[in-house]
Image (cartoon, helix red, strand yellow):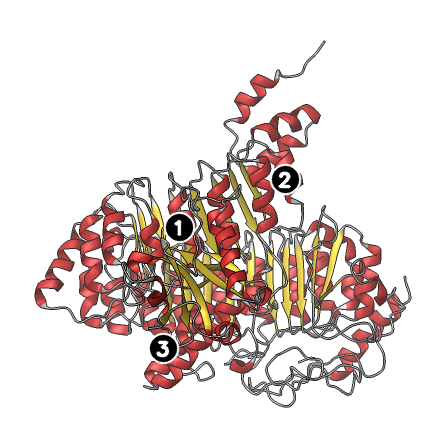
Amino acid sequence: MITELEMGKAESELELGLGLSLGGGTASKIVKPGGGGAWGERGRLLTAKDFPSVGSKRAADSASHAGASPPRSSSQVVGWPPIGSHRMNSLVNNQATKKEDDGKKKAKDDETKDVTKKVNGKVQVGFIKVNMDGVAIGRKVDLNAHSSYENLAQTLEDMFFRSSPGTIGLTGQFTKPLRLLDGPSEFVLTYEDKEGDWMLVGDVPWRMFITSVKRLRVMKTSEANGLAARHQEPKERHKPV
Amino acid sequence: MDLRLPSKVLEHILSFVDSNEDRNSVSLVCKSWFETERRTRKRVIVRNCYAVTPEAVARRFPEMRSLTLKGKPHFADYNLVPDGWGGYAWPWIEAMAAKCPSLEELRLKRMVVTDECLEKIAASFKDFKVLVLTSCEGFSTDGLAAIAVACSNLRELELRECIVEDLGGDWLSYFPETLTSLVSLDFSCLDSEVKLSDLERLVSRSPNLKSLKLNRAVSLDALGSLLRLAPQLVELGTGSFSDKLDQEAVSKLSQAFSEMKELKSLSGLWDVLPEYIPLLYSVCPGLTSLNLSYATVQMPDLVELLTRCSNLQKLWVMDLIEDKGLQVVASSCKELRELRVFPSGAEGLNDTNVAMTEQGLVSVSEGCPNLESVLYFCVQFTNAAMVTIARNRPNLKCFRLCVMEPFAPDHKTQKPLDEGFKAIAERCKDLQRLSVSGLLTDKAFEYIGTHGKKLRMLSIAFAGDSDLMLHHLLSGCESLNKLEIRDCPFGDTALLENAAKLETMRSLWMSSCCVSFGACKLLSQKMPKLNVEVIDEHPLETRPDSSPVERIYIYRTLAGPRLDMPEFVWTIQKNPEIGVSHLAIK
């Protein structure tokens, strides 16, 4: 077992060699507990005292030690034990199932989903997915960049009607404008709201719409039964479900 | 007299040289060999996507057919790399689309792949055949639909442990009826249910299908009909193995399994009920690879299964196997080469699972003469066990021991585990990969530095006492390529003294250690061919040089500092305002 004295000696030898000044209280020490394996109070990496300018915001949930005091059990340490996230989720689910605690398991599943949505490289606030019937690839549109339904409809028409180089499967074959919002058309614009219901676009004020929309779908009019019948009068088509 | 080999002749000779290591040597002989080699290389592997620019790679290897890329450092698997760090696939795909449109295969590991990337692949590479994404994230099932619909010669689509935004299972229905070339499909990491009829139709029109790995949502009942459509499978990943089936369905499933004469690899088996284990008996003798790491199979059932697997070479299992189960492995699976034992969390990560100890691994090391790769999670270990294992298996190439309690000593003698790892390093002369754990002093690393001459990758956590540890490793391990360290009490001195070593390695990761801000700056100043990234979520401008940084990631690069660094990554090039080091320069 290395004693404090030996450790101090080793450090000072190295210190002299390189002329580095690690500062008074900043040299870290991990003091090993006497016998058992518990990583308790005595395991001290660094404390806020050593680094007055560094905050301790992440003290509670991470092993990043500027300002943190060590967690009491290994399961609270970030990334420990070193198991990949898929396996970790499975593990937690197993434990939760064992405890017959469905609520807990569901919470974990939701958590996983949150992580899924978050790790897209960029945070895309205001972007929602748009799919069009018959087109394999969905696109994304930034609602915050639009001020009205007409605006949005124009963007969608440009996106799907005018095919650009490098994209495939888009509606190059349609010769008429989509005219999503008014008049008879092959397509209608629908959206899924926060409750999971599919509605025709255009009935609520724009501001209300952008807070409740989850995703958009350019649906074939013939498919949109329940939302609008094929031979209905144009104005009747806009009845919400 | 011109003694040069005509380039046509050299090209012909090179067509027999497959290994990239050999091709790298060939390209160093002289300029004309370099030229011939680069124009004929088909398979390119870049193990750090920031070590070189995509344009440079595309320019150098115009005939590239297969590209393999790795992005984030390994510790990203354990959430130690913050989101948004980097590893974007887009610049690579864009460059290849422009310069190497004949690209057929793309294998990406730990990279951020967006739906736009997948759409670009689908649109740009006319003969695209293989897409393998391992531990990638950033895309949704819509991106998969784009690949499915457009790649008419697709052979392999494999998603291994990816994080995918799952918008539903209809991506699978986008495979056109004309696609009959599928050899391998792995969607085991997705959550949503795919339409069974689409899957069945896809399988029936894929006569070359050899590998099928289903996701958990595929029921046991569905499995039966799929197996009947594809008895030729060599690799199978089942879905959930837990529906209640009636007697007729069970016997049909049993029949389906017994028809699978080519099956060599089995995985999946989520939630497997004990009464269904016998369904697998007929395929066991043929298996070379068995992954039970998601299957909560308990002991007696495991034994029944494993005694029948006499040809097994690779076994992944949870610690539910216990020492007793590993004894069975030792006596039944004589061909075993690779063993991985994962924690089941059966009794909580902190509690001692007395049924699985170091003894299990000792038995396997005694009974399995070909054992060369081990990953073992357990609660405690002893030096004596490691000494025995090393003596039994000097042929070990990969030894990763994870004692889950940080700083846990030898549980019989209470001493550090230095002597155990010494034995491993000393006796296993071909050891290439090592992960250490438990209570370890600087001595352990002195031994590793002295003996680990072939060691290429080393992972360390909660260990050592001082800078000596790092110094031993960097100065002793001649073949060291990747070093990753977390929560160890040192940094500056050893790092700066061995700075030159860092150019001979692919990368060094250190997190929650004691590397000071000043040392990072100094290292950056001294070593322009390295990217020294400080990854720290607190602002650095006002930090004193002596303050430690949260994480550093250092890697050699020809590409210079990268242009896509997020706010929390600091380098002296990106952040000149942080100034130069005030530490005394030796």
| Residue type of the residue flagged with mark 3 | Asn
In terms of image quadrants, where is residue A240? bottom left
Residue A52 image position (x, y, % from top left): 80, 85
Front residue of B553/B194: it is: B194
Name the front one of labels 1 and 2. Answer: 1
To which chain does the residue with label 2 belong? B
Query: Amino acid type of disc 1?
Result: Val
Q: Chain of mark 3?
A: A
Q: Quadrant of residue A74?
A: bottom right
Q: Residues within 10 Å of mark 3 (few under 14, many from 20)?
A: some
Q: Which residue is mark 3?
A: A94
At 38% from the left and 81% from the top, the residue drawn is: A105
Q: CA distance from mark 1 to mark 2?
A: 34 Å
- Between tags 2 and 3, which lies in front? 2
Q: Nearer the viewer, residue B374 or B327?
A: B374
Question: Pointer 1: residues within 10 angstroms few (<14), some, or many (20+)?
Answer: some
- The residue that disc 2 covers is B57
Which quadrant would the N terminus of chain B be assigned to in this image?
Answer: top right
Q: Along the horizontal axis of the image, is B415 left or right of B571?
A: left
Task: Measure how far apart labels 1 and 3 are at the Cα level.
Answer: 40 Å
Binning the other alpha carbons within 10 Å of mark 2 as few (below 14), some (14 to 19) or many (20 upward) gives many
Disc 1 vs disc 3: Cβ atoms closer than 8 Å?
Answer: no
Query: In the image, are marks 1 and 2 on the same chain?
Result: no
Sooner in the amino-acid sequence: mark 1 or mark 3? 3
Per the image, label 2 sits on a secondary structure element best described as: helix
Quarter where residue A215 is shown: bottom left
Tell which residue pokes out farthest to the left in this image: B248
The C terminus of chain B: image quadrant: bottom right
